[in-house]
Image (cartoon, grey):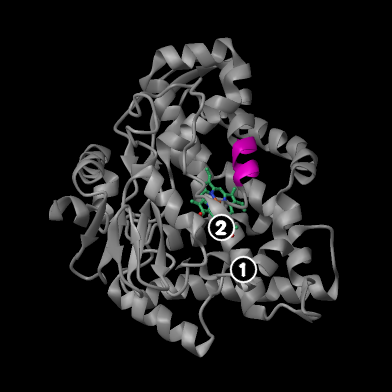
Amino acid sequence: MHEAGRALADPTAYADEHRLHESLALLRREAPVHWVEAPGYNPFWAVTRHADVMAVERDHGLFRNEPRPLLATAQFDAINRQRAEEGTGLRTLVHMDDPDHRVVRAIGADWFRPKAMRALRPRVRELARRYVDRMAELDGECDFAADIAVHFPLYVILSLLGLPESDFPRMLKLTQELFGGADEELRRGVSPEEQLAALLDFFAYFQRLTAARRAEPTEDLASAIANARVDGEPLSDLDAASYYVIIATAGHDTTSSTISGGLHALIEHPDQLARLRNDLGLMPFAADEMIRWVTPVKEFMRTAEADTEVGGVPVRAGESVLLSYPSANRDEGVFDDPFRFDVGRDPNRHLAFGFGVHYCLGAALARMEIQEFFAELLPRLRSVELAGEPELTATTFVGGLKHLPIRYTLA
Ligand code: HEM
């Protein structure tokens, strides 16, 4: 059991889905709220059942995001805590609790509502077409994850922010360095200093952006953030930069991992591919099934403000709980045959976007991107197969396939 618990703090476990899901299934069955002590990490409770994850997220007054919103090494926890105390660390929405969280979330919220999504749809469709055309140019063979999926959502999100296309490659590299932190191939360096350097690069870039949008406001999300007022005051540079960072990072790897993992699932389940291609009306269900299947965000954490219990297990004030979304989304008590990929799954009460006050701000955008991409691809796709071994990112936070070699014919 201890080994199963430790898998949650082991980036390489997430690069081996079989091993990961074996551990999670064991925890759900035998110890759904399990105390984990893993070398190099502060201990935490692993919460693996759907109902318990929801219960913790619902009680946001008791279970707070601060001071430990996600799993990091003990060394990083210490650095983050020190930076928070000094007021020099990033403070994104996931680092906040009410009342601040509600006020700051509202600044960006309009940009993700249905009206804004309808306005953005033609641009998303155009970008989807551009990337399917790119597949056609690649002449029947590509690494779908690295050549296609990683670019499309970043272009969407940076378009929404209003950044120039010439800056996109730099943003791509920075988001990969931040999120691929535990992966040998993607990371900039092992040390916390080097990871922090990636964050500081990000920060400097966005600081310049804030200044530019204040000097000359434009019609984009970056301008809304730069010119927002809280209690009559503009956001500090740090708070504005934090906002851009959460939008640029959260809106990118999550969706691209889902698109790669979704295509992989369709390749592995040709009956589901045929079913979806013959009935594109299933697309909204298929997109959500891809999101459940991949669950690109592996965890967030909460810390108990007072003594309480989760699933009948006592949790003391100051102890942290890790919400395992991949586990909740394979919970046998909630999903019929959870290990079956079903493009028509309904209902599909997955928790891949979290739940409650921190529920993913970009959920509607992510759904739209995934739907538009496959709506563009599938009618043109005559055949598709694997052309090599798919490879997953080693991470405990956000990730999915980093390589998906495919061979295909496109009309
Ligand atoms: C928060 C998942 C795409 C922006 C979150 C959370 C999860 C998540 C699990 C935390 C929720 C919680 O604590 O309850 C995903 C998945 C995506 C995706 C699976 C794609 C399939 C996006 C996109 C954006 C975005 C496209 C666009 C900007 C955010 C933001 C937050 C967030 C700003 C913080 C919300 C808050 O703390 O109030 N997301 N996300 N996400 N997501 Fe996403």
Magenta stretch, residue numbers: 363-369
Q: For the point 52% across and 46% down, which residue is it?
A: 353
Mark 2 neighbour class, 10 Å CA radius: few under 14, some 14 to 19, many 20 or more? some
Q: For the point 71% across and 77% down, which residue is it?
A: 235
- The residue that disc 2 covers is 358
Q: Are marks 2 and 1 in contact (CB under 8 Å)?
A: yes
* Left or right: residue 113 compared with residue 49: right
Disc 1 is placed on an element classified as helix
Q: For the point 55% across and 70% down, which residue is it?
A: 96
Is residue 58 in view? yes
Q: Quadrant of residue 386?
A: top left
* Left or right: residue 232 compared with residue 380: right
Name the amino acid, label 1.
Answer: His
Looking at the image, tell me whether mark 2 or mark 1 is earlier in sequence order: 1
Question: Does the segment drawn in magenta span residue 350?
Answer: no
Whole-percent x, y for residue 369 in the image = 62, 37
Is residue 88 shown above or below 336?
A: below
Whole-percent x, y for residue 368 in the image = 64, 36
- The residue that disc 1 covers is 101
267 or 88, nearer to the observer: 88
Q: Is mark 2 within 8 Å of ligand 1?
A: yes
Is residue 350 shown above or below 245?
A: above
Instruction: Specify the label residue 393 is tagged with.
Output: none
Q: Is mark 1 within 8 Å of ligand 1?
A: yes
Mark 1 neighbour class, 10 Å CA radius: few under 14, some 14 to 19, many 20 or more? some
Q: For the point 29% across and 74% down, which residue is it?
A: 74
Q: Give the Cα separation between the discs numbered 2 and 1.
A: 9 Å
For the stretch drawn in magenta, what is the main secondary structure?
Answer: helix
Quadrant the C terminus occupies? top right
